[in-house]
Structures are given as C-alpha cells and as structure tokens.
Image (tube, rainbow, N blue to C red):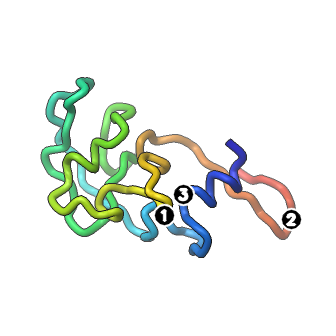
C-alpha cells in the first residue's frame, strides 16, 4: 500500500503529524500479559483504559498479535482503546512492531 494512502486510511482527513491511527498521540506503555498466546481466542489480560492499546516496543510482546485482539480485550471498547482507525479499520498501527519512515512533502523524498 502506498504510504500516503495508508496515512489517509489510518488517520482520516484531518490529522496531526504524530497522531496514531486511533486519533491520539499517546499509547499504553506497559507490558501486556497475553492469555492463550498464538491461539484464535488469544486475549490481553491487562489492557490500558482510556488510552490507545497497540503492539510496539514498550508493550514487550514477542511478535504479531491477531487482528481484533484489542477490541475483545478492552473494558470499554471504544475506537481509541481498540486502536481502530478513523474509518474503523483494525490493526493499522500496533499489530506488529516494525521500522517506519516519514514522507517529507517539502523535499519530495522518503527518509528513514
């Protein structure tokens, strides 16, 4: 997927530079306890409340998580807690920890 299309799908029409797909700029930063890891009914025992939940280096997970794990694990399944995008697409940010780069519109080039 082209990066700018991804950004639009993830953040919607009006967004800030450092915004996550859930329209916030902060995410849960504690290690998750995963129940039934690598199973179709896997769940997170300790999700964050009223903050974006996502899989990244601060949550200390061992690999990818199933799509929708945050929707089934949260206490108040809102778009923010589940990490759902502006257009209600799951797992656009936070399913997998990976490198990213930023598109510099003024320079018309990508940087790492």
Q: Residue at x 42, y 48 (%)?
A: 90
Locate residue 95: give its quadrant. Answer: top left
**Secondary structure category for the residue under label 3:** helix
Q: Which mark is residue 39?
A: none
Q: Is residue 29 above or below residue 40?
A: below
Question: Residue beneath label 3, please?
Answer: 10
Q: Residue at x 68, y 53 (%)?
A: 5
The image position of residue 80, as x and y in percent, is 34, 64
Locate residue 30: give its quadrant. Answer: bottom left
Question: Residue beneath label 2, please?
Answer: 107
The image position of residue 19, as x and y in percent, is 51, 68
- Report if the CB atoms under discs 3 and 1 are less than 8 Å apart: yes
User: Which image quadrant: the N terminus?
Assistant: top right
Q: Residues within 10 Å of mark 2 (few under 14, many from 20)?
A: few
**Secondary structure category for the residue under label 1:** loop
The image position of residue 79, as x and y in percent, is 35, 62
Give the distance between the C-alpha atoms of the residues marked 3 and 1, in whole angstroms: 6 Å
Locate residue 82: give its quadrant. Answer: bottom left
Question: Residue beneath label 1, please?
Answer: 86
């Amino acid at each position: 997927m082209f990066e700018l299309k991804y950004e639009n799908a993830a953040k919607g029409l009006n967004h800030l530079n450092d915004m996550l797909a859930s329209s916030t700029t902060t995410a849960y930063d504690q290690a998750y306890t995963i129940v039934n890891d690598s199973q179709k009914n896997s769940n997170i025992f300790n999700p964050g409340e009223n903050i974006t939940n996502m899989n990244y280096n601060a949550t200390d997970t061992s690999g990818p998580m199933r799509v929708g794990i945050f929707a089934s694990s949260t206490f108040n399944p809102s778009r923010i807690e589940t990490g759902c995008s502006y257009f209600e697409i799951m797992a656009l940010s936070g399913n997998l920890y990976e490198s990213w780069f930023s598109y510099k519109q003024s320079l018309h080039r990508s940087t790492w």
